[in-house]
Image (tube, rainbow, N blue to C red):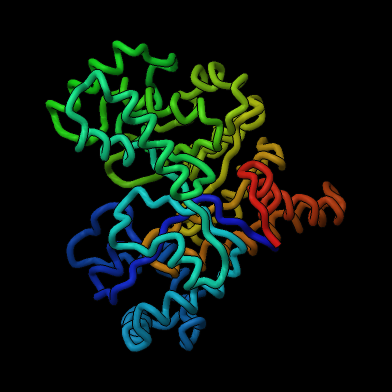
């Protein structure tokens, strides 16, 4: 199955001790004296990544980490990224980018191309660090966004409004006066963009450009208030933007993947994926994928791993998605609900063609 990973991050380039590795397989802080290998994701790493590093499946965690250290970060990254066989990576560089590979470095390590996704809040925070007046923020942000997009040849934008505020924001475009007032508050308080007016301005600025706009949805670290990251809270915003034609990409979505499927079903510009959650639910991943396929139109679902830091996550995301989609679709065919030709058609749409179409990608 051909795959485009339409939302992913880079990998760390330095060797990791056990604490550093386990930090990257957890969304929150681990319980002291306990191991994050005692999770569905930890078991999946021991099961599926160990053979790529020349170990037996289900190798003990200590053996796995010892072998990882023997090979070194560069070789581990090369092996796992290449084994994922992803045809293109669309990379969000807006979080801890200094410790991760750039899209260009990720492409070199994996042997397949990568493109940039620009995080709106990161651009705005850079503007606030250099901006002298609140009244000039809107113009400065517009210029900075255009420069960031052009220099990176960006294919899309990303917002983390779910982390900074929540989806229960006023869906209306803020006025110029409201943006200036909010920028003034931000300049006095610091450069982290958390003001809902500023966040709305960033989002509407991206809508105006027209490139696909990604939203983190649902499952994440402790900065997220889960009940405020339910995508159904975006309903009025989606009503307000549906005539713009700008694609809205709902990322990860768990445990709201059925709500996301509904939104993709009823709004012409909404798409969804399951992202990192398939790695985290492990042995239950096929069941979650089947639930997402209940309402989501097949031309509205995409593949992403949301892998961050560890190449194990890039690899598990790809091989697990292929396995799970094949298992779910084969069950449909075996039950007589789908024809075998439907199976290959949907696999191509979800794995590859939808992303290529929506982001305007050209691949060999």
- Please state which of residues 181 and 251 is positioned toward the viewer in this rendering: 181
Front residue of 272/92: it is: 92
Q: Image point 53% across, 16% down: which residue?
A: 240
Q: Position of residue 176 (x, y in %)?
A: 34, 13
Q: Who's the residue at 30% across and 18% down the image?
A: 179
- Position of 86 with respect to 256 (left or right) is right
Q: Where the N terminus falls, by quadrant?
A: bottom right
178 lies left or right of 268: left
Q: In the displayed structure, does residue 137 sit left or right of residue 103?
A: left
Q: Quadrant of residue 2?
A: bottom right
Image mark count: 0
**Residue 9 seen from this side:** yes
Residue appearing at x 23%, y 23% in the figure:
183
What is the quadrant of the C terminus in the image?
Answer: bottom right
Q: Where is residue 100 shown, x and y percent of the image?
A: 34, 62
Residue most toward the left?
188
**Residue 188 x/y as whole percent:** 12, 26
Q: Report whether 158 appears left or right of 302.
A: left
């Amino acid at each position: 199955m051909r795959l485009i990973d339409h939302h992913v991050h880079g990998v760390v380039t330095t060797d990791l001790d056990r604490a550093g590795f386990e930090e990257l397989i957890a969304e929150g802080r681990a319980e002291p004296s306990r191991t994050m290998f005692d999770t569905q994701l930890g078991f999946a790493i021991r099961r599926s990544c160990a053979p790529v590093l020349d170990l037996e499946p289900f190798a003990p965690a200590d053996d796995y980490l010892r072998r990882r250290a023997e090979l070194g970060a560069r070789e581990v990254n090369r092996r796992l990224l290449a084994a994922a066989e992803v045809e293109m990576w669309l990379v969000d560089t807006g979080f801890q980018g200094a410790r991760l590979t750039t899209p260009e470095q990720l492409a070199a390590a994996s042997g397949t191309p990568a493109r940039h996704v620009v995080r709106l809040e990161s651009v705005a925070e850079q503007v606030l660090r250099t901006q002298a007046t609140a009244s000039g923020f809107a113009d400065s942000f517009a210029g900075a966004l255009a420069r960031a997009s052009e220099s990176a040849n960006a294919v899309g934008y990303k917002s983390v409004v779910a982390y900074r505020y929540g989806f229960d924001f006023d869906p209306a475009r803020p006025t110029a006066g409201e943006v200036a007032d909010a920028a003034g508050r931000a300049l006095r308080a610091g450069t982290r963009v958390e003001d809902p007016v500023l966040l709305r301005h960033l989002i509407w600025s991206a809508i105006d450009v027209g490139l696909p706009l990604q939203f983190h949805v649902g499952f994440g670290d402790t900065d997220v208030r889960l009940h405020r990251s339910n995508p159904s809270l975006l309903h009025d915003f989606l009503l307000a933007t549906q005539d713009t034609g700008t694609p809205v990409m709902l990322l990860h979505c768990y445990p709201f993947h059925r709500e996301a499927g509904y939104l993709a079903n009823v709004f012409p510009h909404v798409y969804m994926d399951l992202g990192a959650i398939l790695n985290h639910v492990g042995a239950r991943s096929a069941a979650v994928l089947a639930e997402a396929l209940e309402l989501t139109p097949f031309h509205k679902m995409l593949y992403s791993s949301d892998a961050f830091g560890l190449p194990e996550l890039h690899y598990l995301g790809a091989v697990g998605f292929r396995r799970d989609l094949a298992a779910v679709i084969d069950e449909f065919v075996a039950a007589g609900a789908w024809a075998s030709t439907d199976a290959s058609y949907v696999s191509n749409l979800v794995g590859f063609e939808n992303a290529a179409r929506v982001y305007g990608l050209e691949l060999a």
